[in-house]
Image (cartoon, coloured by chain):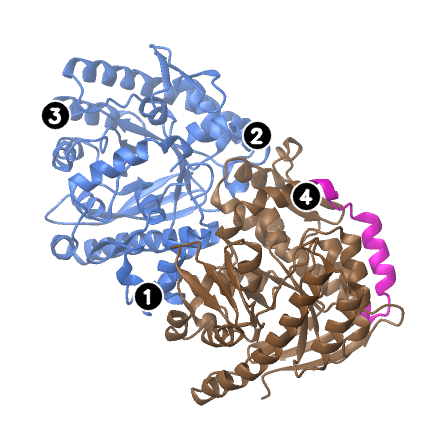
Chain colours: A blue, B brown
Amino acid sequence: MPSFSFTIDAQCPKTWARAGTIQTPHGAIRTPIFMPVGTQATVKSVSPEELCSAGAAIILANTYHLMLRPGSKLIDELGGLHSFMHWNGPLLTDSGGFQVFSLGHLRKLSEEGVTFKSHLDGSMLTLTPESVMQIEAELGADIILPLDICAPYPCPPASAREALERTHRWAERALVAKERVSEARLEHGRPGQTLFGIVQGAFEPELRQQSADFIGNLPFPGISIGGLSVGEPKSLMWEMLGYVTPNLPRNKPRHLLGVGSPEDVVIGVGLGMDMFDCALPTRVARHGGLFTRFGRVNIKAARFRSISSPIEEGCDCYTCQNYSAAYVHHLARTEEQLYYRLGSIHNIRYMSRLTTELRASILAGTYPAFRDDFLANYTPVSEKVREEQREKWRAVRLQGS
Amino acid sequence: MPSFSFTIDAQCPKTWARAGTIQTPHGAIRTPIFMPVGTQATVKSVSPEELCSAGAAIILANTYHLMLRPGSKLIDELGGLHSFMHWNGPLLTDSGGFQVFSLGHLRKLSEEGVTFKSHLDGSMLTLTPESVMQIEAELGADIILPLDICAPYPCPPASAREALERTHRWAERALVAKERVSEARLEHGRPGQTLFGIVQGAFEPELRQQSADFIGNLPFPGISIGGLSVGEPKSLMWEMLGYVTPNLPRNKPRHLLGVGSPEDVVIGVGLGMDMFDCALPTRVARHGGLFTRFGRVNIKAARFRSISSPIEEGCDCYTCQNYSAAYVHHLARTEEQLYYRLGSIHNIRYMSRLTTELRASILAGTYPAFRDDFLANYTPVSEKVREEQREKWRAVRLQGS
């Protein structure tokens, strides 16, 4: 069995949306897909069985956190990440680069790689395109990402270009290194891994086009789009995708890194994105924010105190099928651990159902109407609230998703 | 169907141990039984389905916490505690008295009842034997307890006697009040509740005997033994049971309140106890303490870092069946929420399996050998460590179990 394939099942005639099927050594993924984030080899508070029941087909784990603790070598010795975390479905690991850059522990950036300080014990560590391939091989996810440079927002054009060019050189080095570590894995009977390329280019249309063209033409079976959702207005993110998607090969799945909210996923699909990952749905759940078809509600609000119906009527998640909104409200207000689980399950199921509906609409040829209906009903959180939350969460970010 | 019955299935010929069956409106309970504590209508981090899978046949909820938040009237309106917390098995609620006395918010103790300050909003509240019956009727547990006075350790004999005599008068008032509220419940088609009596008497042999005699002869279908495990040496607790058990009617189940650890349950059964409840197994689990046949281990210890086998070989709990000790160690060290669940499930399953084994040994007539074998293998935590933990937890006690 090949370790990876992507087939397009349907294409929207009016937008860039498409429905596809990805095959991995740990099973198939129907796209569009939302991937919950399990930073430290666990989607916070949720068990693998619950992820499965909630419809999660693939999850993401963070290389940065796992290389520091418990260490990729140990995970390898224990049979790899799938076995370690008791998740037998497809897994994706990022490269750790985003955390090194965004968490501000970077000490030195050179052509060779990045040197940074561990947030756990202060030790100095270096990541190179080659060492990242080794680490991700030890973790053993089905889809892996190469070391890249995520430019901040805003970013001077010259710096953006410099970062991009280095990212491209690193991409080529990663491809070479990946071949080498793959051979070693295969010799040990471990399933193959698939390396996606990462498109960067900050907020420069020309760089984005150039990166899509360059990365798209390298032998990466899939493409992740990085450097977006880093603090810019959403309109700017969507604009950038307009320069990326048309310049990417049609036959490779496109993964929008670190996005997003329900409305982001609905819009992103129309701009050609097949895969999404984000800690937001589970993170906001832990803070009381639960998704409904009309927008996000705060379950801690007094109005839920005596509601005997579920969070959302008709929701088929474990939480809504078994508990009243009043009970979930009680657990959230008393900060009971069961709350974090029930809230997270609800939002994961919501995202999973949403992508299933998006797929159905693409197959039916009605994606544009689905998108417009969704956006007409769903009131997103304002940019202001979003910015406040971002600030609040930045402080605790090192603790994971 | 009567709302309660107790039958003795076997009796140890050499000790006070016996195996029995309790029938409640929400199912049968085989004794001896350990009851996990779900202070705020949730056994911290564990779902009802997981409790069931771990073999928990009955759980306890705390009236004190629930009357304050979300309030017993609201729970009643939402269909009672079973429906509220999605637990369809037998439930027991305590009277709230223990928390009022032990948490130190007591403001006034009179013949009428106790007045105390809510730890949530500082409001003054009064509990009487009658109001407690009303509150517990609203909560709707299968087994309920009357308001009592739990004397501290140590306690001057005169105060112990005074508290005991008032507890006895309150017991009689509770029985009268219970009849009245039961009639109202039955009129509304709600299942019957069973009021246990509470034996007190501090650490005075004569008072313990007197209380067992008095409470045992009132029309309570079951007996809880209170005022033990309040800081005294364990030997003193066991000594007190020697004055209680022989003076209690044989045909009523005996519940040892707030006990205990694995070794406590093994010993307590031999002293005639049928039911145990304690937050300890789940609380120590959350702090990293997991039970094995050789004693409690600290899963955070470095020696578990790379152990690919489960916490305990042969354990049939969800955690041990699906995760390595190394993964549980990783979750505990990173303070991941899934850890609290996996640890709690392991200890709940341990306690449940232990009581099943105790029952089997009683049925087989081999309880004394089982007890001796268990105690020979199991190294309990020392009194010193126990006392340090007690101090540490006292501070956070108001937050629940």
Q: Which of the two discs, 1 and 3, labels the residue nearer the N terminus?
A: 3
Can marks 3 and 2 be said to lie on one chain? yes
Res B161 seen here:
yes
Q: Which mark is residue B387?
A: 4
Q: Which mark is residue A74?
A: 2
Q: Which residue is at a point 29% across and 21% down the rendered structure image?
A: A149
Classify 10 Å Cα crowding around label 2: few (below 14), some (14-19), many (20 and above): many
Q: Is residue B379 magenta?
A: yes
Foreground of the two, A182 or B123: B123
Q: Which of the two discs, 1 and 2, labels the residue nearer the N terminus?
A: 2
Tell me the element at label 1. Answer: loop
Mark 1 → mark 2, Cα distance in angstroms? 43 Å
Q: Is residue B115 magenta?
A: no
Residue hosting label 3: A205
Q: Amino acid at mark 1?
A: Pro
In the picture as drawn, the residue positioned furthest to the right comes out as B14
Q: Amino acid at mark 3?
A: Pro
Q: Amino acid at mark 4?
A: Glu
Residues shaded magenta: B362-387
In the rendered image, the vertical position of residue A230 relative to residue B340, given as above or below: above
Q: Nearer the viewer, mark 4 or mark 2?
A: 4
Q: Residue A275: x, y in percent? A: 29, 42
Label 4–label 1 contact, CB within 8 A: no
Q: Residue A112: x, y in percent? A: 37, 11
Q: Residue A41: x, y in percent? A: 47, 39
Q: Amino acid at mark 2?
A: Leu
Q: Nearer the viewer, mark 3 or mark 4?
A: 4
Mark 3 → mark 2, Cα distance in angstroms? 42 Å
Identify the chain of the residue marked 1, using the numbered disc in the image: A
Q: Nearer the viewer, mark 3 or mark 2?
A: 2
